[in-house]
Image (cartoon, rainbow, N blue to C red):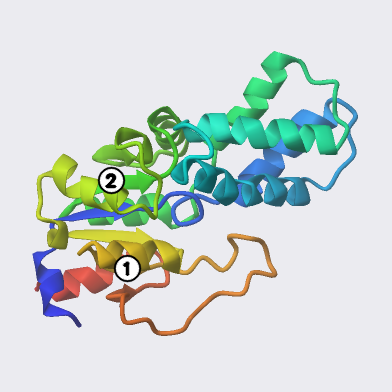
Amino acid sequence: MNESLKNVKAMTFDVFGTVVDWRSSISREVQQILSNQGVELNPDEFADEWRAGYGPSMNKVRTGQLPWMKIDDLHRIILDELLKSYQIDQLTEKEKVFLNHAWHRLDPWPDSVKGLTMLKKNYVISTLSNGNVSLLVNMAKFGGLPWDTILSAELCNHYKPDNEAYLSTSQFLGFPIEEIMMVAAHKGDLSAAKKNGMATAYIPRPMEFGPDTQVDNNDEDYIDIVAKDLPDLASQIDKIRT
């Protein structure tokens, strides 16, 4: 184990896919809302397509093709495009807003609340998500996620993996960057965090994209800890502390 991990004081978490099960949650909401309108579709595929627009939309902001806008607004742009491609035109504006806010109502993975509660005893725990602040606050209230604070790309106007998103954690939390651990289910997130001086923990989520997800279990030199879930992370890092 890396002895430097004994110095970790705070943990920041990717949220979509790492802490919450976005796919099942969005699929459920799509099914409930659109089936009431008599729309027939595969809600899992709709959820996947909605999520697939997330990265390209953020990249347009990161490269200046779009002005800065929060994830709620990007989600709405993607949703409007999807509704058009599916030829769904019967939703009112109120119904579209409610559907777009399905991203505020995502279920935690079964281990998330327990694991975060365990980690909270010894560490400051925070989101570090591309989701906007109101989205993350509403999600925490909905799922009972016990964050100490909410950090978001919105606070520094930079989406991950921009360096500014990671470096801002030191400014906001008041710890040197090397005393903050990034926890994520996505290796790209962890690679960028490590390049900016953070400790890293990888939590594979085999069901993030459904039962056919291929999990990357290869060893990486930028990952300090691999844990099967959040309680396992708490157990492993407690052993390092003692």
Residue drawn where x is 63% and y is 60% of the image = 209
Q: Which residue is mark 2?
A: 126
Residue drawn where x is 25% and y is 38% of the image = 149
Residue 86 pos. (x, y %)? 85, 38
Query: Amino acid type of disc 2?
Result: Ser
Query: Amino acid type of disc 1?
Result: Ala
Quadrant of the image for the C terminus? bottom left
Q: Is residue 192 left or right of residue 94?
A: left
Which is nearer the eye, 66 or 97?
A: 66
Visible in this render: residue 171?
yes
Residue 53 pos. (x, y %)? 64, 47
Which is nearer the eye, 177 or 37?
A: 177
The reply to whether discs 1 and 2 touch (Cβ–Cβ < 8 Å) is no
Q: Above or below — where is 101 with respect to 54?
A: above
Q: Quadrant of residue 87?
A: top right
Total marks placed: 2
Is disc 2 placed on a helix, strand or loop?
strand
Q: Is residue 67 left or right of residue 89?
A: left
Q: CA distance from mark 1 to mark 2?
A: 14 Å
Q: Above or below — where is 197 with respect to 165?
A: below
Which of the labelled discs sits on residue 201, or is there none?
1
Residue drawn where x is 38% and y is 42% of the image = 145
Q: Is residue 101 left or right of residue 3?
A: right
Residue drawn where x is 39% and y is 51% of the image = 160
